[in-house]
């Protein structure tokens, strides 16, 4: 799958909420198209969190090349700008090797950054960063959010008060540049020089709930409690993104003796379900490719072979034709 003449090279996006089966679809497509699966999940980039973030297994990564999984230490916060640069490099490498880039994940902000570009926000300075960290520690995320709402309502309105990392970053930008993040993000951006065909996996809620419950049992059997216990021993800053990965706070509470394992797993299932709802809403209302090149799949995918021969041919033809 390539581009002739002045046409842009093509890439495939496979997006959807947690436990929707998007990884199975991406793997199946990569096997049939000669592709590279490139991670677009903000938590699966962290080296120490294989089980709790449901990264592809060693058996799966042996079938086709995978990129950007477990490549960053949890002590270093990943950002959309960092991921975009890494993803573009991985896509270029795939193309140079004659393979199809297949971007797979559930972090909508990453897809938006890749396809539509990111605002060029100036360096904010260490003083602004230090102030944001200090205020977060002193006031907590809710208090810092209230302060942000007073000075930059446009940005605050886009954020959840509990999202400490993004609230602190918004304060840092406002303090360091004199403009709110929303104002910077309104500036024109440059999208990636690729032609994207997108598949959005959007199963029914009950299918996701069942898949989340089954996944949790597999994680426990695979040693997720031990993985989180070892991770917590690193003593990382609680404000780091990896410390808020689904399952980490809940299992930390269990390991601290605040609840039993059954209660922790029940909490993970609840929080995961809430997260999948936000993910699904994001993907339904955002554009990752031109409308003519986006295909929605409304069933959960266990593996690519669940599609009939005609359905598989239709999916592959959709990609080959550029949608």
Image (cartoon, grey):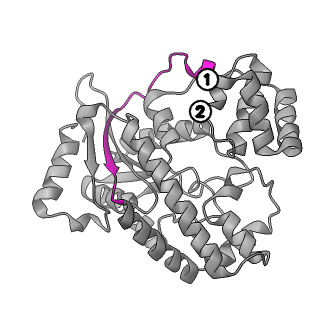
Residue 298 picture location, percent across and down: 27, 55
Q: Residue at x 44, y 65 (%)?
A: 61
Q: Which mark is first along the chain, 2 or 1?
A: 2
Visible in this render: residue 64? Answer: no
**Tag 2, which secondary structure?**
loop
User: In this picture, which residue range is highlighted in magenta?
Assistant: 182-204
Q: Position of residue 63 (x, y in %)?
A: 37, 66
How far apart marks 1 and 2 lie (CA) works out to: 8 Å
The reply to whether the magenta stretch includes residue 120 is no
Please provide percent x and percent y for residue 296: 27, 47
**Would residue 195 be counted in the magenta stretch?**
yes
Q: Could you tell me if the residues under marks 1 and 2 are in contact, i.e. CB atoms within 8 Å? A: yes
Q: Which element is circle 1 on?
A: helix
Instruction: From the viewer's side, name the closer residue of 32 and 262.
Output: 262
- Quarter of the image where one finds residue 264: bottom right
Q: In the image, residue 67 lies at what x, y percent?
A: 49, 53
Residue 127: quadrant of the picture? top right
Residue at the spot 50% in from the left edge and 16% down from the top edge = 188
Which of the numbered marks, if any, corresponds to residue 182?
A: 1
What is the crowding at mark 1: few (fewer than 14 residues within 10 Å), some, or many (at least 20)?
some
Residue located beneath label 2 in the image: 158
Q: Residue furthest left?
A: 310
């Amino acid at each position: 799958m390539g581009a002739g003449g002045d046409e842009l090279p093509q890439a495939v996006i496979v997006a959807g909420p947690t436990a929707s089966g998007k990884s199975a679809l991406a793997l199946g497509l990569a096997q049939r198209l000669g592709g590279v699966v490139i991670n677009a999940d903000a938590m699966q980039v962290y080296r120490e969190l294989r089980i709790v973030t449901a990264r592809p297994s060693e058996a799966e990564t042996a079938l086709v090349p995978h990129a950007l999984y477990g490549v960053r230490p949890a002590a270093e916060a990943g950002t959309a700008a960092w991921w975009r640069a890494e993803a573009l490099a991985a896509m270029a490498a795939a193309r140079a090797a004659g393979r199809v880039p297949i971007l797979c994940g559930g972090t909508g902000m990453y897809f938006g950054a890749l396809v539509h570009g990111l605002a060029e926000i100036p360096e904010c300075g260490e003083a602004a960063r230090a102030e944001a960290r200090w205020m977060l520690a002193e006031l907590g995320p809710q208090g810092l959010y209230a302060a942000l709402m007073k000075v930059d309502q446009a940005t605050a309105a886009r954020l959840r008060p509990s999202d400490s990392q993004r609230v602190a970053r918004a304060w840092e930008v406002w303090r360091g540049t004199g403009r709110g993040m929303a104002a910077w993000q309104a500036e024109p951006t440059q999208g990636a020089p690729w032609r994207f065909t997108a598949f959005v996996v959007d199963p029914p809620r009950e299918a996701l709930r069942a898949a989340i419950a089954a996944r949790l049992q597999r994680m426990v059997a695979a040693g997720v409690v031990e993985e989180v216990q070892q991770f917590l021993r690193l003593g990382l800053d609680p404000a780091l993104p990896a410390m808020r990965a689904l399952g980490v706070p809940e299992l930390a509470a269990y390991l601290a003796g605040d609840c039993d394992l059954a209660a922790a797993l029940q909490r993970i299932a609840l929080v995961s379900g809430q997260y999948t709802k936000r993910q699904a809403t994001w993907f339904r209302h955002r554009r990752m490719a031109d409308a003519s090149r986006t295909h929605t799949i409304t069933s959960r995918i266990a593996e690519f072979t669940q599609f009939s021969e005609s359905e598989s041919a239709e999916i592959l033809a959709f990609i080959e034709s550029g949608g």
